Image (spheres, rainbow, N blue to C red):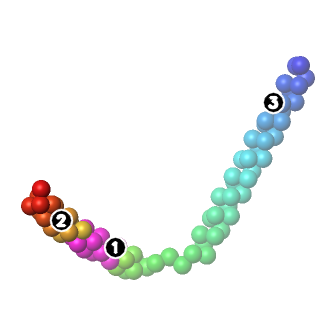
Amino acid sequence: MGAARDRTTSGAGVDSNKHMSRLITYFKETQAELKHVTWPTRKQAILYTVVVIVISLATSAYLGFFDYVFSTVLKLVI
């Protein structure tokens, strides 16, 4: 039984090295792919951020308005 444990333990080390190697390969490939990305300029990033914030505020105002209207109508009915 002792020999079986030794093989299992040494096998786990091999698996661990294999997983570590795959992880390192993954990060290297990811880094290489990120070099091919066309990143937005600072001006574009700011513009897109402002657009998202404005649309979010408009949506929240729209939903808030209808929430208020429906709540008021429901209070009058009940």
Please check the rendered image and state whether residue 76 is part of the magenta-colored stretch, yes or no.
no
Q: Which of marks 1 and 3 is nearer the N terminus?
A: 3
**Residue under pointer 2:** 70
> Of helix, strand and loop, which one carries label 2?
helix
Image point (73%, 47%), residue name: 19
Main SS type for the magenta part? helix
Q: Label 1 to label 3, Cα distance in Å?
A: 53 Å
Question: Is 49 rendered above or below residue 3?
Answer: below
Image quadrant where residue 66 sits? bottom left
Residue 18: in sight, yes or no?
A: yes
At label 2, the amino acid type is Phe
The residues bearing labels 2 and 3 have C-alpha atoms spaced at a distance of: 66 Å
Q: In which quarter of the image is residue 2?
A: top right
Q: Which residue lies furthest to the left in this view?
A: 76
Mark 2–mark 3 contact, CB under 8 Å?
no
Q: Quadrant of the C terminus?
A: bottom left
The amino acid marked with disc number 1 is: Val
Locate residue 16, reporting x and y percent.
75, 41
Which residue is the site of mark 1? 52
Q: Is residue 40 left or right of residue 6?
A: left
Q: How crowded is mark 2: few (under 14 residues within 10 Å), some or many (20 or more)?
A: few
**Residue linked to disc 3:** 9
